[in-house]
Image: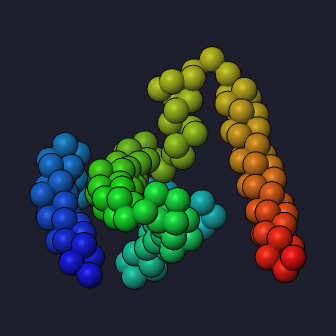
Amino acid sequence: MISLFISLAVLLIGFFAYGKITEKVFAPDNRQTPAVAINDGVDHVPMKTWKAFLSQLLNIAGTGPIFGALMGAVFGSIVFLWIVFGSILGGAVHDYMSGMISSRHRGSSIAELSGTYILTASEGFRIDWTISCIVGICAAATLLTIYLIFLIKSLRALKTR
């Protein structure tokens, strides 16, 4: 229980301290977001603040109960540190940074921005590569699920003998 309270304290300290550093780097101002400036009714639509926060919470915290439990089973209690520091240094800052960069480039996606700054040669290759990666990840997840099902069935069969 002490590690939980220590983790919560570190998260709060990280929120206030690292948040200030990130805010100084990006220097947010009062410019309109692409949802207000463009507002095409399809891709750029203004949201209520509570819906935006809820969406962000679900995107970040949605995998926590699944991934955190798996990591804890594999690596033990050291995962507390990984989750806490990963949330501070990786998750929160990455989401804030990608949102700020996207809003300063008229709501462009990360794929479009990487094409602008990294891969200017061919957009088709980038889209094909992204689709291939998504298909590969889905295939790997499917194979892992099938493997785990067979592993569980095998362990149950060994237990009944």
> In the image shown, does 43 or 158 lie closer to the viewer?
158
Q: Position of residue 46 (x, y in %)?
A: 47, 71
Q: Position of residue 159 (x, y in %)?
A: 79, 76
Whether residue 124 is visible here, answered yes or no, is yes
| Relative to 42, residue 118 above or below | above
Residue 83 figure quarter = bottom left
Residue at x 51% of width, y 28% of height: 116
- Is residue 30 shown left or right of residue 153? left
| Relative to 11, residue 51 above or below | below
Q: Position of residue 35 (x, y in %)?
A: 46, 62
- Is residue 96 shown left or right of residue 16? right
Whether residue 131 is visible here, answered yes or no, is no
Residue at x 72% of width, y 26% of height: 125
| Relative to 104, residue 47 above or below | below
Quarter of the image containing the C terminus?
A: bottom right
Q: In this view, which residue lies farthest toward the front?
A: 161
Residue at x 19% of width, y 65% of height: 10
Quarter of the image containing the N terminus?
A: bottom left
Residue 49 figure quarter = bottom left
Name the image colouring.
rainbow
- Is residue 53 shown left or right of residue 15? right
Q: In this view, which residue lies farthest toward the top?
A: 121
